[in-house]
Image (cartoon, rainbow, N blue to C red):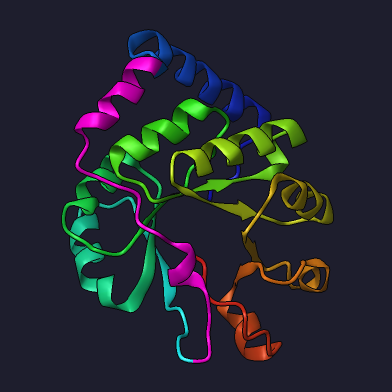
Amino acid sequence: MNFFNSLDLTKLKKEIDRKKQDYPQEWLGRSLAYTPYQPRPIKTILTKTKNFNPKNIYQIPLTNDFLQIAKTNETLASCFSVYSLENLTFIRRYVQIPLIFNYPIVDSYQILESLVFGADCIILNPAILSQKELKELNDFTIKLGLQSIFKITTKEDLRKAIFAGVEILNIQDSIDLIPLIPNNKIILANQAFQKTKGVDSCFVFL
Protein backbone atom coordinates (compact mmCIF):
# COMPACT_ATOMS: atom_id res chain seq x y z
CA MET A 1 0.00 0.00 0.00
CA ASN A 2 1.38 3.40 -0.91
CA PHE A 3 2.41 5.68 1.93
CA PHE A 4 -0.08 8.46 2.66
CA ASN A 5 1.09 11.60 4.44
CA SER A 6 -1.16 13.95 6.40
CA LEU A 7 -1.89 16.08 3.33
CA ASP A 8 -2.91 13.03 1.32
CA LEU A 9 -5.20 11.87 4.12
CA THR A 10 -6.84 15.30 4.30
CA LYS A 11 -7.55 15.12 0.57
CA LEU A 12 -8.87 11.58 0.96
CA LYS A 13 -11.26 12.59 3.74
CA LYS A 14 -12.54 15.50 1.63
CA GLU A 15 -13.15 13.11 -1.25
CA ILE A 16 -15.11 10.78 1.03
CA ASP A 17 -17.20 13.72 2.29
CA ARG A 18 -17.96 14.62 -1.32
CA LYS A 19 -19.05 11.05 -2.05
CA LYS A 20 -21.32 11.10 1.00
CA GLN A 21 -22.99 14.24 -0.33
CA ASP A 22 -23.49 12.75 -3.80
CA TYR A 23 -24.42 9.26 -2.63
CA PRO A 24 -25.24 9.02 1.11
CA GLN A 25 -24.11 5.98 3.05
CA GLU A 26 -27.72 4.94 3.65
CA TRP A 27 -28.31 4.76 -0.10
CA LEU A 28 -25.06 2.90 -0.59
CA GLY A 29 -26.17 0.35 1.97
CA ARG A 30 -29.47 -0.17 0.18
CA SER A 31 -27.63 -0.96 -3.03
CA LEU A 32 -26.25 -4.11 -1.37
CA ALA A 33 -29.62 -5.75 -2.02
CA TYR A 34 -28.85 -5.56 -5.74
CA THR A 35 -25.17 -6.51 -5.81
CA PRO A 36 -24.39 -10.03 -7.09
CA TYR A 37 -21.26 -10.21 -4.92
CA GLN A 38 -21.25 -11.94 -1.56
CA PRO A 39 -18.07 -11.84 0.57
CA ARG A 40 -15.89 -14.91 0.09
CA PRO A 41 -13.99 -16.31 3.09
CA ILE A 42 -10.32 -15.38 3.09
CA LYS A 43 -9.16 -16.53 6.50
CA THR A 44 -9.33 -20.23 5.67
CA ILE A 45 -7.52 -19.63 2.39
CA LEU A 46 -4.63 -17.97 4.26
CA THR A 47 -4.43 -20.51 7.09
CA LYS A 48 -1.54 -22.94 6.87
CA THR A 49 -2.18 -26.54 7.93
CA LYS A 50 -0.27 -29.80 7.71
CA ASN A 51 -1.95 -30.57 4.42
CA PHE A 52 -2.25 -27.07 2.98
CA ASN A 53 0.20 -24.26 2.34
CA PRO A 54 -1.24 -20.93 1.10
CA LYS A 55 -0.03 -19.53 -2.18
CA ASN A 56 1.19 -15.98 -2.65
CA ILE A 57 -0.96 -12.89 -2.52
CA TYR A 58 -0.51 -11.23 -5.89
CA GLN A 59 -0.64 -7.45 -6.36
CA ILE A 60 -2.56 -6.47 -9.50
CA PRO A 61 -0.80 -3.46 -11.07
CA LEU A 62 -2.59 -0.34 -12.29
CA THR A 63 -1.99 -1.09 -15.96
CA ASN A 64 -4.26 -1.44 -18.95
CA ASP A 65 -3.81 -5.21 -19.04
CA PHE A 66 -4.81 -5.70 -15.37
CA LEU A 67 -7.57 -8.18 -16.23
CA GLN A 68 -5.31 -10.37 -18.34
CA ILE A 69 -2.70 -10.32 -15.55
CA ALA A 70 -5.36 -11.44 -13.05
CA LYS A 71 -6.63 -14.26 -15.24
CA THR A 72 -3.10 -15.46 -15.99
CA ASN A 73 -2.05 -15.54 -12.33
CA GLU A 74 -5.25 -16.85 -10.75
CA THR A 75 -3.93 -20.39 -10.28
CA LEU A 76 -0.68 -19.07 -8.75
CA ALA A 77 -2.26 -16.96 -6.00
CA SER A 78 -4.39 -17.37 -2.90
CA CYS A 79 -5.81 -13.85 -3.29
CA PHE A 80 -5.39 -10.74 -5.38
CA SER A 81 -4.55 -7.37 -3.88
CA VAL A 82 -6.14 -4.56 -5.91
CA TYR A 83 -5.60 -0.83 -5.45
CA SER A 84 -8.52 0.42 -7.59
CA LEU A 85 -12.19 -0.25 -6.82
CA GLU A 86 -13.03 0.06 -10.50
CA ASN A 87 -10.47 -2.58 -11.44
CA LEU A 88 -11.54 -4.75 -8.52
CA THR A 89 -15.21 -4.91 -9.53
CA PHE A 90 -14.18 -5.75 -13.11
CA ILE A 91 -11.81 -8.54 -12.01
CA ARG A 92 -14.49 -9.96 -9.68
CA ARG A 93 -16.54 -11.04 -12.70
CA TYR A 94 -13.78 -13.25 -14.07
CA VAL A 95 -11.83 -14.81 -11.16
CA GLN A 96 -12.84 -17.08 -8.29
CA ILE A 97 -10.20 -16.24 -5.68
CA PRO A 98 -10.81 -13.54 -3.01
CA LEU A 99 -9.97 -9.90 -3.67
CA ILE A 100 -8.30 -7.54 -1.19
CA PHE A 101 -9.00 -3.81 -1.52
CA ASN A 102 -5.53 -2.41 -0.83
CA TYR A 103 -6.16 1.28 -0.22
CA PRO A 104 -6.01 3.54 2.88
CA ILE A 105 -9.25 3.14 4.86
CA VAL A 106 -10.22 6.04 7.13
CA ASP A 107 -14.02 5.87 7.09
CA SER A 108 -16.73 3.21 7.30
CA TYR A 109 -18.13 4.55 4.02
CA GLN A 110 -15.11 3.11 2.21
CA ILE A 111 -15.68 -0.32 3.74
CA LEU A 112 -19.29 -0.39 2.64
CA GLU A 113 -18.27 0.87 -0.79
CA SER A 114 -15.65 -1.86 -1.14
CA LEU A 115 -18.29 -4.50 -0.36
CA VAL A 116 -20.62 -3.07 -3.02
CA PHE A 117 -17.76 -3.19 -5.55
CA GLY A 118 -17.04 -6.85 -4.74
CA ALA A 119 -14.15 -6.84 -2.26
CA ASP A 120 -13.73 -9.74 0.15
CA CYS A 121 -11.12 -8.12 2.39
CA ILE A 122 -9.72 -4.68 3.22
CA ILE A 123 -6.44 -3.32 4.59
CA LEU A 124 -6.42 -1.41 7.89
CA ASN A 125 -3.36 0.64 8.81
CA PRO A 126 -2.98 1.38 12.56
CA ALA A 127 -0.41 4.08 11.77
CA ILE A 128 -3.06 6.39 10.29
CA LEU A 129 -5.92 5.57 12.70
CA SER A 130 -6.53 6.12 16.40
CA GLN A 131 -7.15 3.11 18.61
CA LYS A 132 -10.88 3.92 18.70
CA GLU A 133 -11.10 4.37 14.93
CA LEU A 134 -9.22 1.13 14.29
CA LYS A 135 -11.50 -0.88 16.55
CA GLU A 136 -14.68 0.65 15.13
CA LEU A 137 -13.60 0.11 11.52
CA ASN A 138 -12.58 -3.50 12.17
CA ASP A 139 -15.87 -4.20 13.95
CA PHE A 140 -17.80 -2.68 11.05
CA THR A 141 -15.80 -4.77 8.58
CA ILE A 142 -16.68 -7.98 10.43
CA LYS A 143 -20.33 -6.92 10.68
CA LEU A 144 -20.49 -6.70 6.89
CA GLY A 145 -18.97 -10.15 6.48
CA LEU A 146 -15.60 -8.91 5.22
CA GLN A 147 -12.13 -9.62 6.62
CA SER A 148 -9.44 -7.13 7.68
CA ILE A 149 -5.70 -7.39 7.17
CA PHE A 150 -3.73 -5.08 9.46
CA LYS A 151 -0.57 -3.51 8.06
CA ILE A 152 2.03 -3.61 10.85
CA THR A 153 5.42 -1.88 10.81
CA THR A 154 6.03 -0.95 14.49
CA LYS A 155 5.39 -2.27 17.98
CA GLU A 156 2.80 0.48 18.44
CA ASP A 157 0.97 -0.67 15.31
CA LEU A 158 0.95 -4.21 16.69
CA ARG A 159 -0.33 -3.11 20.10
CA LYS A 160 -3.21 -1.17 18.53
CA ALA A 161 -4.01 -4.06 16.20
CA ILE A 162 -4.19 -6.58 19.05
CA PHE A 163 -6.60 -4.39 21.02
CA ALA A 164 -8.68 -3.93 17.86
CA GLY A 165 -9.12 -7.69 17.43
CA VAL A 166 -6.65 -8.44 14.63
CA GLU A 167 -6.63 -11.91 13.04
CA ILE A 168 -4.42 -11.37 9.98
CA LEU A 169 -1.25 -9.26 10.09
CA ASN A 170 0.88 -8.09 7.19
CA ILE A 171 4.29 -7.41 8.71
CA GLN A 172 6.17 -7.29 5.38
CA ASP A 173 9.84 -6.72 6.40
CA SER A 174 9.28 -6.29 10.16
CA ILE A 175 10.41 -9.80 11.05
CA ASP A 176 11.51 -8.69 14.54
CA LEU A 177 7.83 -8.31 15.49
CA ILE A 178 7.02 -12.01 15.08
CA PRO A 179 7.96 -13.03 18.68
CA LEU A 180 5.52 -10.37 19.94
CA ILE A 181 2.54 -11.66 17.96
CA PRO A 182 0.04 -13.82 19.90
CA ASN A 183 -0.59 -17.39 18.81
CA ASN A 184 -3.32 -18.28 16.32
CA LYS A 185 -2.75 -15.19 14.18
CA ILE A 186 -2.15 -15.36 10.43
CA ILE A 187 1.13 -13.66 9.55
CA LEU A 188 1.94 -12.33 6.08
CA ALA A 189 5.54 -11.38 5.32
CA ASN A 190 8.14 -10.97 2.63
CA GLN A 191 9.11 -14.24 0.97
CA ALA A 192 12.79 -13.69 1.78
CA PHE A 193 12.07 -14.14 5.49
CA GLN A 194 10.21 -17.37 4.86
CA LYS A 195 13.32 -18.78 3.22
CA THR A 196 16.12 -17.30 5.29
CA LYS A 197 14.62 -17.01 8.77
CA GLY A 198 12.70 -20.27 8.89
CA VAL A 199 9.40 -18.57 9.65
CA ASP A 200 7.09 -21.12 8.10
CA SER A 201 3.92 -19.23 9.09
CA CYS A 202 4.74 -16.43 6.64
CA PHE A 203 4.40 -16.08 2.93
CA VAL A 204 4.54 -13.42 0.26
CA PHE A 205 2.47 -10.27 0.44
CA LEU A 206 3.33 -7.85 -2.37
Residue at the spot 52% in from the left edge and 67% down from the top edge:
205
75 inside magenta stretch: no
Q: Quadrant of residue 7?
A: top right
From the viewer's perspective, is 82 left or right of 199? left
Q: In the rendering, at what x and y percent does residue 185 appear?
A: 66, 67
From the viewer's perspective, is 113 left or right of 90? right
Q: In the rendering, at what x and y percent does residue 146 appear?
A: 45, 47
Relative vertical location of residue 31 with respect to residue 101 in this rendering, above or below: above
Q: In the rendering, at what x and y percent does residue 180 appear?
A: 83, 67
Task: Name the residue nearer the viewer: 92 or 146.
Answer: 146
Residue at the spot 35% in from the left edge and 49% down from the top edge:
39
Q: Quadrant of residue 20?
A: top left
The boundaries of the magenta stretch are 26-50
Relative vertical location of residue 166 with respect to residue 144 in this rendering, above or below: below
Q: How many marks?
A: 0
Residue at the spot 33% in from the left edge and 40% down from the top edge:
85
Residue at the spot 60% in from the left edge and 21% down from the top edge:
10
Q: Quadrant of residue 183?
A: bottom right
Q: In the rendering, at what x and y percent does residue 133 appear?
A: 68, 31
27 inside magenta stretch: yes
